[in-house]
Amino acid sequence: MAADTEPTSEPDVVVIGAGPAGLTAALYLARYRRSVLVLHDGKSRALRIPLTHNTPGFPEGVRGPDLIARMTRHAVQYGATIQEAAVAAVEAVAGGFSLHLADGSTRSSRAVILATGVDLNQVDLPEAVHEAAIRAGVLRYCPVCDGYEHIGKRIGVIGCDTNGAAEALFLRGYSQNVTLMPLNRPELSPAEARALADAGIGLETGALLALEPGADDITVRLDTGAPLTFDVIYPALGCRPRSLLAEQLGLDLTEAGCVTPDSVFDSRVAGVFAAGDLVEGLDQISVAMGHGAVAATRAHNWLREQEQATLESKAGPSRRRMRTRTSRNSR
């Protein structure tokens, strides 16, 4: 991440989050010649990606930290300001928004884009061991991102409370050797059990005793049998949307806690837009970038409408009548 730069005045827009969605929004806003401040807590999920081959334009793959660094430089080049600071609260005030930071300071803006992302529900491993397993490629959390890299491999899926059966069936398209470990078999419906059996997906039940990542594989120990070794494990444990700020602002949330997809275009809270994994849908880098571009454009156009209304208000009734006559003549 590029070095922080301090804002010199109140920005038009504050973007909260510096992942692919937030940084794309910042780039677009800067190129729209808007003053934009990006506030982030340094916890973008993209920073943890060891290598992804699913980002368009990078056929050789790209590391998450490298992608974020490139996107940060790009946005800063056109005038965006980036500051690492956790936002604790946001509230609508006259003329815009007041943002309260964790360090006790405040920022203000005329519009806000929420790109706060999600937190993963992770398997229980010491942090250093967990991150080493991700770097080694034996632990993965996104089958859409990484399934292709595991064609023909021994794939294990852990957990079923967030649709582990569906994840195992998806991964069956990449390998004939897929095993689901739902941990709690009653979570499987009869229809899911039949679909798994029809697809030839193995089923292993029992309480999880331990995960033992290695350099090239990972061993799972359940309390019901011998250790199981896989080339890769995909936990299907779900995620937690980072939606506290969205809730504070009154945005509509789904049952899972995400903001609704229309919030990219119109959150129904004036001046607030959303982008990225916080939005219900497909959690992918390319989708987040698209969200960021749309949210930034909608924010820019919303600000233009406010500015036009302010000009007309200052101009008085005669100017508004003149504009109406001109508009009619131009049709």
Image (cartoon, rainbow, N blue to C red):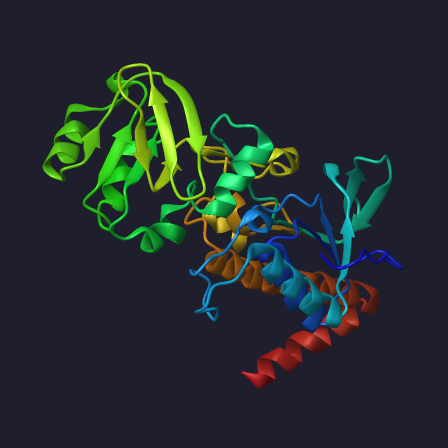
Which quarter of the figure is the N terminus placed in? bottom right
Which residue sits at x=22%, y=45%?
172
x and y, in percent, of residue 248 in the image: 65, 33
* Residue 32 seen from this side: no
Q: Nearer the viewer, residue 275 or 286?
A: 286
x and y, in percent, of residue 170 in the image: 26, 45
Which quarter of the figure is the C terminus placed in? bottom right
Which residue sits at x=78%, y=67%?
311
Q: Quadrant of residue 183?
A: top left
Which residue sits furthest right? 8
x and y, in percent, of residue 221 in the image: 35, 22
Q: Is residue 184 above or below residue 79?
A: above
The answer to whether residue 51 is left or right of residue 164 is right
Which residue sits at x=12%, y=32%?
197
Q: Nearer the viewer, residue 31 or 165?
A: 165
Which residue sits at x=72%, y=77%?
322
Q: Is residue 242 above or below residue 80?
A: above
Q: Is residue 237 above or below residue 65?
A: above
* Residue 197 seen from this side: yes
